């Protein structure tokens, strides 16, 4: 079991896994850091996609030029050192070409990132789309696999949206058709799981009531064994593009569609989705608010039993027509960030705004964010990411150093990395040691007490240096917590004599892999047993008797000859 230990800057608070309800201090909109690409250029659209995980951030610039390839695309990695966000890597596809749009979507999970390239050609299929997996190994980000749909077709736009959670990935293909009907645009979502060092397509999700032009897979969000897929162009009754959202839960080896959600009066409901446990946030970016067309709404749903109930409907306190509030949405616990990239601010058309809502009791309280140096046309809020006490907002059309639409990202708050206690459940060790002793396998006269103690100890090690000594069954915790997003790697360093132990779930990413780490031990069975309780003198006499017998037999053979 991995128990989550959040260390908040304002509150000294301990949360167990899955517990919520505490109210964090609001993020300060004046504590702003502006981030731009080190090699940014005109029309890069840096900030169109953002993913934030603890002290690490990924930013996509899907129109960035790579060599002579226009719009091949790049993804930038930033790590926070306690003061600054430092650009630590720039990622590109190893087979990228012009107009791939690599970086259209990004999703970060610890030391792993998934990147969408939804216009990539696959074989002769134009715009089929592909996704790329990169892993951080030894300080270097390495492309480890390229993913495509096993039934992909031209114009599918596979990876227009994706969501990564540890060893699982959900990928949307909003233009794909389950039956490969050209220009149907019903949409499909694909599940990939990492097994045996390789990512394999494990499921294909299709809406139970899917129809042409629904764009199922336009937005996706994954949290463990639950997936949410948005289909914002779905017609509901006579309402064109009202939109729907589908919830899937893993049941054994199957993903069951367990809920279908919509909103009365919705318009592009499902434009954005964000899932965190039993809570779901959905963007409805063209929804009418009062008399304001296309102002937008963010809907909050909470799971009670087996039913998802809409618990809140959030709107901007100063919202106006055509804001597109809900174009981007990001949820974590009792906090949700909503982008309104077309909002006019301070007289600047399409300058953009972002709103963060914090839940206290039953009330969601609003804090508004704007770029301190923003201007017209920046479209600040095109994408948002919230993680703990940190908010990141993309302004993809921002002018930087005279470069139109180079783009920028604004970060608010200071990440305080959560740490996780790495716990191990040990079973069978006590019984194995008792069985071994009953066979006198542990009886060693003349051996030092220190040696006997080592002979009865199981020693585990985490990340090559944190040792944990175990002598009986129970739950044990390594001394050194692991920061959220960092890897843990538990190994067996020392086994007790004549005992075999099997380790499961020993490796993963803190805060991502919630499966238990377990050790199961058994005494080794052997047909031979040591002679019980022989001291040094008795053993010496026995050996002397064997030698004398051998000498006698040898002499008899010589006499016979």
Image (cartoon, helix red, strand yellow):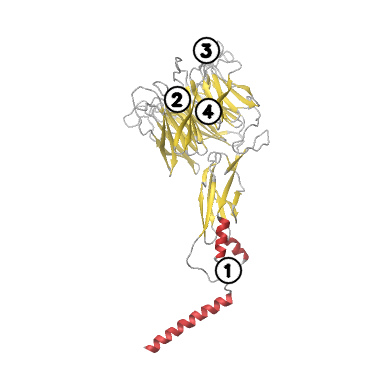
Q: Is residue 538 above or below residue 314?
A: below
For the N terminus, the quadrant is top right
Quarter of the image for residue 420 reads top right
Q: Position of residue 364 (x, y in %)?
A: 63, 23
Can residue 394 be seen by looking at this rendering?
A: no
Looking at the image, which is closer to me, 528 or 320?
A: 528
The residues bearing labels 2 and 3 have C-alpha atoms spaced at a distance of 22 Å
Looking at the image, which is closer to me, 121 or 185?
A: 185
Q: Which residue is mark 4?
A: 274
The residues bearing labels 1 and 4 have C-alpha atoms spaced at a distance of 62 Å
Q: Position of residue 106 (x, y in %)?
A: 48, 31
Q: Which residue is mark 2?
A: 218
Q: Residue at x 53, y 52 (%)?
A: 520
The residues bearing labels 3 and 4 have C-alpha atoms spaced at a distance of 24 Å
In the image, taking residue 181 as reference, residue 315 lies left or right, namely right
Mark earlier in primary sequence (3, 4): 4
Numbered disc 2: secondary structure: loop
In the image, taking residue 327 as reference, residue 214 lies left or right, namely left
Q: Which residue is mark 1?
A: 444
The disc at residue 177 is none
* C-beta proximity under 8 Å, tags 2 and 3: no
Mark earlier in primary sequence (1, 4): 4
For the C terminus, the quadrant is bottom left
Q: Residue at x 54, y 62 (%)?
A: 497
Q: How many residues crowd around disc 4 within 10 Å: few (fewer than 14), some, or many (20 or more)?
A: many
Q: Which mark is in front, 1 or 3?
A: 1
The residues bearing labels 4 and 2 have C-alpha atoms spaced at a distance of 13 Å
* C-beta proximity under 8 Å, tags 1 and 4: no
């Amino acid at each position: 079991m991995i128990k989550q230990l959040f260390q908040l800057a304002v509150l000294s608070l301990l949360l167990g896994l899955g517990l919520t309800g505490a109210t964090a201090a609001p993020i300060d909109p004046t504590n702003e850091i502006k981030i731009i690409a080190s090699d940014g250029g005109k029309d890069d659209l840096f900030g169109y996609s953002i993913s934030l995980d603890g002290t690490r951030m990924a930013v996509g610039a899907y129109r960035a030029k790579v060599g002579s390839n226009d719009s091949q695309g790049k993804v930038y990695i930033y790590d926070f050192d306690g003061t600054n966000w430092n650009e630590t890597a720039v990622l590109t596809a190893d087979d990228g070409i012009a107009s791939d749009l690599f970086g259209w979507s990004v999703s970060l999970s610890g030391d792993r990132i998934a990147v969408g390239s939804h216009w990539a050609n696959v074989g002769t299929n134009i715009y089929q789309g592909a996704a790329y997996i990169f892993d951080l190994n030894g300080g270097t980000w390495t492309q480890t696999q390229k993913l495509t749909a096993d039934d992909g077709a031209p114009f599918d736009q596979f990876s227009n949206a994706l969501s990564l959670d540890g060893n699982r990935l959900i990928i949307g293909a909003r233009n794909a058709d389950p039956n490969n009907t050209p220009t149907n645009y019903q949409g499909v979502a694909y599940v990939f799981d990492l097994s045996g060092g390789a990512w394999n397509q494990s499921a294909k999700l299709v809406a139970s009531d899917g129809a042409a032009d629904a764009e199922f897979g336009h937005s996706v969000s994954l949290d463990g064994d639950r997936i949410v897929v948005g289909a914002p162009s779905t017609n509901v009754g006579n309402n064109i593009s009202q939109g729907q959202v589908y919830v899937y839960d893993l049941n054994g080896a199957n993903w069951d569609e367990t809920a279908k959600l919509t909103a009365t009066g919705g318009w592009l409901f499902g434009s954005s989705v964000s899932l965190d446990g039993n809570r779901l946030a959905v963007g409805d970016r063209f929804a009418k608010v009062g008399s304001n067309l296309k102002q937008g709404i963010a809907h909050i749903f909470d799971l009670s039993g087996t039913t998802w109930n809409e618990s809140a409907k959030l709107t901007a306190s100063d919202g106006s027509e055509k804001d597109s509030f809900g174009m981007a949405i990001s949820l974590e616990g009792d906090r949700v960030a909503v982008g309104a990239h077309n909002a006019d601010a301070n007289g600047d058309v399409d300058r953009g705004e972002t709103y963060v809502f914090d839940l206290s009791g039953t009330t969601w309280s609003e804090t508004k964010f704007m770029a301190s140096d923003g201007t017209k046309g920046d479209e600040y809020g095109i994408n948002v990411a919230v993680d703990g006490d940190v908010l990141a907002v993309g302004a993809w059309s921002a002018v930087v150093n005279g470069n139109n639409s180079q783009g920028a990202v604004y970060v608010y708050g200071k990440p305080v990395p959560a740490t996780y206690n790495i716990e191990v459940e040990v079973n069978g060790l006590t019984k194995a040691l008792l069985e071994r002793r009953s066979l006198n396998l542990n009886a060693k006269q003349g051996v030092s007490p220190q040696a006997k103690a080592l002979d009865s100890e199981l020693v585990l090690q985490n990340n090559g240096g944190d040792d944990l000594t175990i002598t009986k069954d129970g739950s044990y915790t390594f001394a050194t917590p692991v920061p959220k997003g960092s890897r843990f790697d538990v190994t067996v360093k020392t086994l007790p004599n004549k005992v075999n132990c099997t380790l499961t779930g020993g490796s993963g990413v803190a805060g991502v892999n919630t499966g238990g780490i377990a050790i199961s031990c058994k005494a080794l069975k052997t047909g031979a047993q040591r002679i019980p309780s022989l001291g040094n003198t008795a053993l010496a006499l026995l050996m002397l008797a064997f030698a004398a017998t051998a000498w006698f037999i040898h002499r008899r053979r010589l006499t016979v000859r």
